[in-house]
Every structure is written in structure tokens, then in C-alpha cells.
Amino acid sequence: MLKNITLKKTACYGEPGQALSPLKTVNVIYGENGCGKSTIARLIKESSKAEFSQCNIEWDLNTPLKTYVYDKDFIEETLRETTIKGVFTLGKESSDATAIIDEKKLIKHQIELKLKSLSEQIEEKELSKSTEYALFEEKCWDIKKRYEDIFSPAFKGLNRSKSQLTAKCIESINNDHMHVYNDLQKKVNIFFASNIQKIKPLPVIDTSDLVDIEKSDIFKAKIVGKEDIPIAGIINKLESSDWIRRGLGYFIEDVCPFCQQKVHFNLREQLNSYFDEFYSQQIDDLERKSKCYFNTTTSIVSYLENLASYDSEYFKFGTVKPLIVAIVSIIDKNKAVIDGKKKEPSTLVTIDSILLQLSEIDGIINTANTKNADYNSTIDNLAKEQTLLIKHIWEFIGNELHDIYIEYQTRLRPVTLALDGMRKKVAQFTSDVSNLANDILGLEKTVISTTPSKDGINSILNFYGFNNFTIEESGIGYYKIQRPDGSPAGKTLSEGERTFITFLYFYQLIQGSISRNDIESPRIIVFDDPVSSLDSKILFIVSTLIRSLFSKKELMRLNIKQVFILTHNVYFHREVTFTSSLKYLGDTHLTEKDFTYWIVRKKSGCSFLTYYQNNPIKTNYQLLWQEVKNYETNPATSITICNVLRRILENYFRILGGIDLNDLSEKFDGAEKLVVRSLTSWINDGSHFAFDSMDISSGDILVEDYLHIFKKIFDVTEHSKHYEMMMRMCS
């Protein structure tokens, strides 16, 4: 059956759309002509049409059913040709076969009820499953919100879809990889930086010259003059070599630069011989080595100080700064020592090495350069590294969600097991229903005929006094409409007769099918204004026939799953929905709980649907009086007027006034007393039974008597002003 119907952007239904939901076994929709009722009927009948592309109908179990729609199109199509397709229904030729069919139908119906119950249980379990999933989905979303600022590249494309995010989370759970949050964060900052670029390698220190200088013996050597001359002994003994060398530059002729006395003619010659070529070579070597040391260490210090500009992720200047301070200190000390050596070449001095500190710095630089090279290699393969990083991030998120997911699966497991069991039962029951349907179809082939439908239509026509035409068989599988003299009647039927005969045909059609193989298919029935152009007599018959469907046994026999009734006629609406007399027959008949009520209204060119839990079109007291007033202009309502009189009298005298209607006859004499008794007797015996009332011939004369006595009852009971007021209100 249909679960809900949505009408949108079609006919007079616009945005955002109107919905018929909930829907039950019988759904009654009231509305004035042109307000959009027939659009509902056409949507049910032809939902695949382009004009309904924005509309939607939802079927129970997603299984569309065969739909029978009685509307103007049905009337036109039925009577378009001189013959009508016959309706195949079950005949009564074989009581044994029909008894077996009924038994199998009952079993099939019981299984279908179980299927429906299972379907409802499955929906509940699916809802429970969806609820659990929604809770887990929120947990996944919370994880995203926690990490989305840090790991934003991993969430690209998932920021607006909880379902896609959750699927990605589930995919990442149960991995064996462990990742540290801080490491991932650093890599994201590197690999997804907006200004990412390669790191320049740190320059390597060249210490080759320094090694040569520090290993040189010149600084350790005692530089003195030639020792095989006479004056050498005293110079060496006094260790005045450096003093004499400096003073030698002041030696003028034969005057000693030290004592200013005239000296021996060969003293100057001996002193020059003392500071020979070898001495000069040592002095020159000392000068060269000193200059080289000064230049090399100056370059090294400059290089070391320049390392500050290379401060990066893998090289921190602060780690080498203490070593640089130590190196500078040693160099400054060595320079002072060398300067002293240069002044006094004979002095023995030691140069402190800085190679150890430089080696430590060199190790730090080499380590940094290795890391820099790895980083630069990563940049060369950035896309690959980014993909790998995102994979690692999702592995991290999967581990974060692992315990939550296990808890979710634990709660979900009993629901899943229950659903599996239910679906297995559904499969079994579905198979059983299919087998029973095949059995029933096989049995029905022996008793199917179009004759019962023909006889049923003619029986109703005859029963209600329509004797000027009948429906007869015309060849195999076809009917024709003919007059009593045998002439065809199809083209000469009045509009009311056309509507009535097609309704009776439709009424038989919903009990069978125009195909032998389709009389057992489950079906939905739609009545779209079935009483249009009908007088009150036929209207009453139609409403009675429709109400006869509201029996659980009848619905099961005909395999009718749902009924839709659309009308603009208040009286028809009242009659077809009069279920209060069935309230004690809930086990066998439909009651109010099986009905939904709707009113469709049009405002500013758009249709609106309003749902009512209870029937909004009431059989009110004023409407009854309106029926009495209508008789003056439409005597054809005589078929129902007596029922109306009874209801008014019951409402006003018995229900409101507490007066027994049987006592009213005592206020009249003679013939009037007999009419009163006749009226109240008919009221008590026949008014509640629609079919039984049809055998009473309520002629115009009898109705006139009833109306006269009806008015006089108010007069003799001194309630004439109430009668006058109600008739005046209905004018």
C-alpha cells in the first residue's frame, strides 16, 4: 500500500509541495471542484508521467501495487466502443474449488499479515541501527572538529558530508600503524606549507691550512744565530740574541748601539755573521706561518659567525655557539703568543689547537646537511610524500576511533543479528505467499468467468429499479449495453446513467480483472468524484456499495489493500464515512482508526492539503434541515428524506429532549395518528440498514404526508418556533 504521497510543481501544487501522510486503509479527501483532487488521483494512476517528475509516491516495502482508478477518463474509455471488456471473477460452478481457494486465500492473507508485521519490525530495527550509526557518525565528526585545523589537508572534500567522513573513518580503523601526533603535525607544517622551498646545504670547513700551521715546528723552535763564531758564546750565555738582533739596526760605523763606545773593528762583522742566512730563513718562515695563521683563523671565525644565517629545522646555531666562543678565545690567545714569538724568536711557544672544536662543529654540520638532503629529496617527491602523510594521518585518526568503533559494533551486533533473522523469515514467507498465489491461480482457472460480473451488475440494476437497460455478454470476454428490446443502449444513455453503469462496471472490475491471470493481484482502489452528475437516489446506492467494501473479510477476499475516495459532495462524504454504526464491529469491519481525512483547499492559485485525525465533514444538525428544505426544489431526494426526518426527530426530541418518539403518536388523532406511527415505525425498523431500506416504496404522496406530520409534530409539542427557525436558516 501507499505510505505517503508528495505533490510538488504539478497542476496547482507548487513549492515546497504538499504531502498526504500518514495514509491508512481508507483515505477520504474532500474539496471543491477545481481545487486539485483529480491531480492526486492521476498521480497515483500515472506517477511516471513527466508532469509528475517533482512528485513522489512511497510504497510499503517499495513494492508498487496494481491501481484501479474510477474517474472521468475511466468513464470515457469504458464507453468509447460499443463493447466493453469483460470482467473475469470467480464463479460458483465448483463449490469444492472455491472452498479450497478461500482457505488458501485465508492462509495467504495470514502470512501477508506476518510479512507486514515483520516489515514494521525491520523498520524499527533499521531505525535503531540508523540511530546507532548517527551516534557513531557524531563521534567521527567530533574527531574531525578536534583535528581539522591541524590536519586540514586530510579532510579535504569531507567537510560537508558526515556520511563520507564516517565511511573514511571506518575504512581507517583496525590498522597496525602507530603515529605520533607531534611528528604528523610537523610534517603537515612542512609538506603543506604555502612557501615550501629547498634548504641550502651548510658549507664545509676547510682546515687543511690550519692543520699544517698547527703542526709546524717553527713556533716551538728557538731561533738564534750562528754558534761557531767567538761572540756567539757570550750571546747565547746571556740569551740576548733577540735584544742584539733588534739593536743591530742601530749600529753606526764603530760606535756600539748599546753602550755608545768605540768598539773593535770586527765586532760588527761578527754580529752580522752571527745572524746568518739560516737565521733569516727561520725568521721569514715564522713570519709566513704567523701571517697564514692569522688569515686562516680570521676566515674560520668569519665562516663560523656566518653559520647564524643557516639557522633552520635541522641546524640550530645555538648548538655550535659555545664551540665558536671557545675557538675564538683560543685563536685570540694563539695570536698573542705568535706576536710574542715574532718579537722574541728565541722564545719557545706552544700553539693551542682548535681542530677538536672544529671537528665537533663539522659533525653537527654534516648531520644537518644529511637531514637537509633528505628534506630536499622530499620536496623533489612532494606529491608522493603528501599522499603518504595523509595516509598516516588517517591511520592516526583510525587508532583514535578504535575503541569507540568497537563499542559501536558491540551495540550494533544484536540488532544486526535480529535483522538477519527477520530477513530470512521474510524470504521464507515471501516464498510461501508466492507458492500459495500459484496454487490459487491454478485453482481459479477452473472457475473463472465473466458471467458472474455481468450477473452482478444486472442484479444491482434490477434491485434498484433500473429496468430500461442491461449489460449482456458479447462474444468471449466482452460485454454490451442493450435496451429490453435488444437494441444497443451505449450511445443513448443519459449522463447519470453513463456514470452509474460505469461505476457498477468498475465495482465489478475491482473484484476481478479484465485478464484471467490477474484477478488475484493486490490492488489499490481510487474513487475520484464517483457521484458527479448523479441524483440522490443513485448517490445513495453508490455510497452504500462503497461502504460495503469496509469489511475486513471483503477487503481480504478482493485483495484490496487501500482505498482512496475524493469528492466534493458533502452528502456523499457523510454517507460513505458514516462509521459510527460499525464501532462495535471492529473485529470484522473498518472503524475510524482505519480512516484518514483530508481537505484540499485552493488559495491564491495554489492547493493546500490539511490532515484531520477525525472526520472534519460532520453530519451536523443544520445539514439535516438543509435536506428537508432541499426537498421543496428537488423531490428526487425522497429516497433519503425519511432517514433525514428520523435523525432530526431523534436529535431534537429523544437525544436533546428526552422524549420517546413512540409517545408522539398519542398527540394525534385519526389518520394523522396512523401516519405518525408509520413514520416512527419506519424510523425504528429500517433507517439504519441501507440495503433493507431500498425495498420501501417511498412515493411522493407518502413523503408529503411525512413532511406534513413532521411539521405538525413541532406544532403540537409547542416547538414550532424551532421548526420555523431551522427552515429559515436553510433558506
Image (cartoon, rainbow, N blue to C red):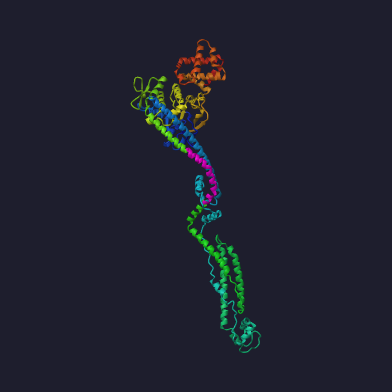
What residue do we see at 59% from left, 80% from top? 223
Majority secondary structure of the magenta segment? helix
Is 662 covered by the magenta stretch? no
What residue do we see at 43% from left, 29% from top? 105
Q: In x, y percent, where is residue 593?
A: 51, 29
Q: Residue furthest bottom?
A: 265
Q: Is residue 517 left or right of residue 704?
A: left
Vertical arrangement, residue 283 with respect to residue 299, above or below = below
Residues shaded magenta: 395-422
Q: Nearer the viewer, residue 102 or 616?
A: 102
Is 414 covered by the magenta stretch? yes
Q: In x, y percent, where is residue 243?
A: 63, 81
Vertical arrangement, residue 376 with respect to residue 632, above or below = below
Q: Does residue 453 appear in the picture of this structure?
A: no
Q: Nearer the viewer, residue 625 or 483?
A: 483
Q: Nearer the viewer, residue 328 or 406?
A: 406
Q: In x, y percent, where is residue 411?
A: 53, 42
Q: In x, y percent, where is residue 489?
A: 36, 23
Q: Is residue 398 left or right of residue 489?
A: right
Q: Quadrant of residue 266?
A: bottom right
Q: Quadrant of residue 82?
A: top left
Q: Does residue 486 appear in the picture of this structure?
A: yes
Vertical arrangement, residue 430 with respect to residue 355, above or below = above
Q: Residue furthest left?
A: 475
Q: How many marks?
A: 0
